Amino acid sequence: MARTGALPGSAFPLVLDVDLTPNPVCRGPVQGRVQIYDPAAARSGATVEWRVRAGAKRLAGGRLAMTAGVGTATFRLPHDRVPAAETAVQIDARIAAAPGHPAAGHYGKVWRDTLRRGCDPVRVASVGDSVVWGQGLDHDQKFPYLTGQLLGRETGRGSQHRDYAISGAVLDAPGLPAGNKDAACLRTTEKQDPDGDGEMEFGEVTQQMPDVFCQLDRAGAEARAGGYGLDLVVINGCINDLDPFFGIGVGLTPGSEDLPKAVKRECSGVGAAPENPAEDVPYFSGAKVGYGGRGMRAAIEKAHALPGRPKVLVADFYYALSRSSSPIPVKTCSTPGITAGRRASCRAALGKVAERYEQYTQLAGAAYRQAAAAANKASQDGPYATAADGLFTVDNAVLTPHSKVWGNPVTDPAFPLRTRACPELSATPLQCLSAAVAHPDIAGARQYAESFLLNPSLRSWFHLPHQGPRARLKAPEHARLGGEVPLSVTVNGKPPAAGYRYHWYFGDGTEQETDQASVTHAYDHKGPWLPRLVMTDRDGRRVLVEAPGDLTVK
């Protein structure tokens, strides 16, 4: 009998998801649910042993007969066994000993979370595509989770995170459900959500649905059923509506040739033609269903309408490919279904891939800022949305010396899950297996979260102390392409006190560090750009200063 998980270093049995409800807990017990994934164990009729630990202390455990690929075990932690302070917990599983196999297998990959007491956690929901999902990352490494965790620690409230994102999701699929009646999504089931709770346990497997608007409906339904309000929604979207492979990269997908026009259509929801020109492309593409949907402003406003009237943080797009990346391999154009003519066009366009991705990053960032500003202007209860920046540069892209994205499709933490789940659940398993490439790695995800915690709006909303002087970044409104643009920072109209280090982010993917409160920069691409500055004092405290508006370069 095959005994999956018995080999040293094996990831299986794999803990697919752990729900601790409530967590933090104010009073009463914590109800726990563990989902374990091991199709081979199910086929052999094996039994799994699972355990929940806090360091060397065992909190719960049991045995589970694997009658299906995904098995579920439950447990209960009395309130007096829940740590008063935030405590790391680990959950793992192994194949149990059985007749003919007296030795139990080795424990598989560990699921990590935290557990604590508390009555008013910062509740965060995340919706979006593979970037917000955190392609290739373990649960506790993803930036929405880390953002909530950092907020919970700085406020002293602890945090709860609910993730509704899924790899491949489009921002809006206008015909799914019909007539954009998003509540109909609550009556659908997804293979990637085996327990039907709206969180995509198999979100690593690429799928265009549920779109972001459907994800928001599910987040609202779960909040109402649980009787809680949300504090923050982390959101992104629209890259898959354009097709990140053959649309943004090479402009092969119909409707993506003119990238500024395509971004305006998909990210801002303006300018769609009556018929979708990409509806019948012979390859996997979100453009088939996402063409011409609602834009980011509508998604922001829907997010704010969820229970609790949460604040909304729009996560910007980092540099997946850039001018600093090594050459892109020609085999990128060899996807099954591509005709010889399309393949030739794709190869001819490869030299422009990095330029187009940089352009998409800039255009999407501007669209997100405009959407947040428009939502805030129309708000009846004050500003609630911010387009936050992860402070990534062109030197952090794939195939660069300082990359902060996955460059190898088999070394990320979620690869063991994809090796089993992609052949089972994906229509394009080869693409699914390599889907983590060019997504933020562990360091990149942490940079997202730490940069978000510098965002002035976020700090104000959650009453976090200002970590430095209330400075003002001075930048002109207009500049000439190639000309030297002066940037400077002041505090109450004067230069800052001595002792600061200045890290300038010019908005075009480049950066510079100085010990002076002013700098000049020549832009070699048309804007708009939004300059930012991180000031660091002698004690290592950092403060983010943004220019008052976009800088237009012509």
Image: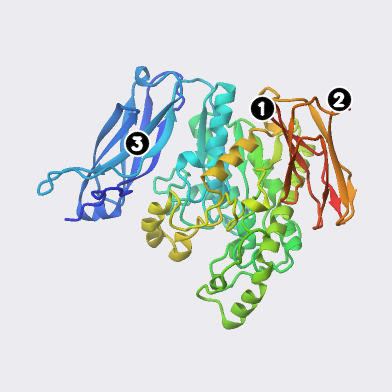
Identify the residue under disc 2: 492
Identify the residue under disc 3: 91
Residue closer to the observer: 488 or 416:
488
* Earlier sequence position, callout 2 versus callout 3: 3
In this rendering, would 250 be left or right of 54? right
The answer to whether residue 312 is above or below residue 468 is below
Q: Distance between the residues labelled 2 and 1?
A: 20 Å
Query: Mark 2 belongs to which amino acid?
Result: Asn
Residue closer to the observer: 429 or 192:
429
- The reply to whether residue 80 is in sight is yes
Indicate the position of residue 280 as horizontal and vertical percent values.
59, 72
Indicate the position of residue 517 as horizontal and vertical percent values.
81, 34
Displayed quadrant of residue 351: bottom right
The answer to whether residue 454 is above or below residue 203 is above
Looking at the rendering, in which quadrant would you find the N terminus? bottom left
* Earlier sequence position, callout 3 versus callout 1: 3
Query: Mark 1 belongs to which amino acid?
Result: Arg
Instruction: Look at discs 2 and 3 and give the one toward the viewer.
Output: 2
* Earlier sequence position, callout 2 versus callout 1: 2
* Residue drawn at point x = 61 percent, y = 41 percent: 448
Displayed quadrant of residue 177: bottom right
